[in-house]
Amino acid sequence: METRAPFIVVGAFVLAAIVAAFGFVYWLNNSGGIGKRETYQVVFNGPVPGLLVGAAVLFNGIRVGEVTSLEFVPDRPRDVHATIAVLEHTPVRADTKVGLDFQGLTGVPVVALEGGERIDAPRVQGPLIAEKGAGQSMTQAARDALRKVDTVLSENSGPLHDAIGNIGTFAEGLARNTPRLDNIIAGLDRTMGSGAPARKATYDLSPASRFDAPIRPIKGTLSIAEPTAITALQTQRFLFAGDDAQDFPDAQWSDALPQLVQAKLLQSFENYDIAHPPFRPDAAPEGSSRLLLDLRQFEIITTPQPHAAIALSAKLLDSAGHLRAARVFHQEAPIETLAPGPAAKAFNAAFDALARELVLWTAGNS
């Protein structure tokens, strides 16, 4: 009885170990990450450098299986057939793209599957065809590019040699004629003017300031937007109308015309009723009325007599955005002499009359 006891204990231990091993295999196959697999054959039309049995298979970057076998095709020496096993529910379909990806610093190759765009694509029935050049690594691509560059250089060695020689000849000629080139550049500099560009005389508009009593206050708050204007009016230059092109090259306004008109109109409204000053749109309180302006004209008309002309349209909107009133304003003033100073004086006169008219019209409709 004592002799048989150790054999019973040893047998029970061995049987328990066998059962545990079978249980572990069953768990690993069903719950431990292996699960049921589906196999597909991948056809590579070219070399697959470094791909080994056991290499990972990725679907959209997620590991779903591994390579189970690699084999050659006797009648197609360039082809390599790889068998892959992936998880059962991996969406491998007819439009799935197949290629090789090289990961890490050492460039370990893996089979990369990329899902297609069609949701209704059927399940793949035959082998998966890898994209052309899928097995080309970055190193191989660099070798091919350098080989092409070398071919181009070899085929054009003669013209390249001649071009380099011509560059040397040109450099020698340029060195011999450097003093002459210096003289030419100096002459151009004297012709076109040297040093810093001449300072332009800057002219400004004056806001309207004389308003006849009684002053009718502006109701509520008002915002005045920057006038819209065509590109030609978005300038600091003095503009001329007519066929004879003229200019005041040494004169300019203190700001681009739309911004200048907006600033001076704001000051004109403040001069009219400082207790209810207008605002720029970005600083206006909620529920403010809006004065929308479009600058139509701000130019010198030379015929029949030189005169300054300013025109703009105005739309007054209430706090709800409804149009309350609209009008076009136009003023002109004669220019005594066609020069920047007299022209600026005429523009000031025309703007003063237009601004006073616009302010009174806005106050009457507020």
Image (spheres, rainbow, N blue to C red):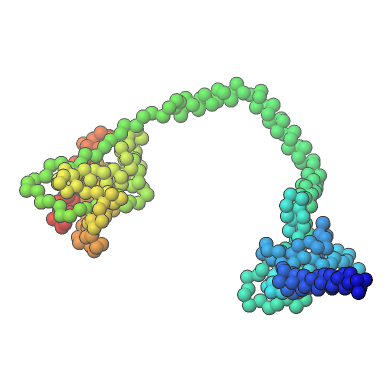
Name of the residue lying farthest toward the front: 1
* 229 relative to 70, above or below: above
Between 114 and 31, the residue placed more toward the observer is 31
Q: Quadrant of residue 64?
A: bottom right
Q: Relative to residue 296, is residue 79 drawn left or right?
A: right
For the point 12% across and 42% down, which residue is it? 210
Point 78% across, 47% down: residue: 146
Query: Which residue is at the front of the view, 296 or 149?
Result: 149
Q: Is residue 20 left or right of residue 353?
A: right
- Residue 249, x across and y down, in percent: 36, 35
Q: List x then y, in percent, for residue 30.
A: 73, 73
Residue 345, position in %: x, y?
Answer: 22, 37
Residue furthest out toward the left: 214
Residue found farthest to the top = 179
The percent position of residue 358, horizontal first and vertical second, equals 18, 51
Q: Nearer the viewer, residue 72 or 175?
A: 72
Residue furthest toward the right? 3
Q: Residue at x 13, y 55 (%)?
A: 364
> Compared with residue 187, is residue 9 higher up or lower down, i.e. above or below?
below
Report whether 121 appears left or right of 190. Answer: right
Query: Which quadrant: the N terminus?
Result: bottom right
User: Is residue 362 visible from the viewing direction of this image?
Assistant: yes
Quadrant holding the C terminus: bottom left
Q: Quadrant of residue 304?
A: top left
Q: Is residue 315 depicted above or below 300 in this figure?
A: below
Q: Residue at x 70, y 33 (%)?
A: 167
* Quadrant housing residue 176: top right
- Is residue 86 shown to the viewer in this render? no
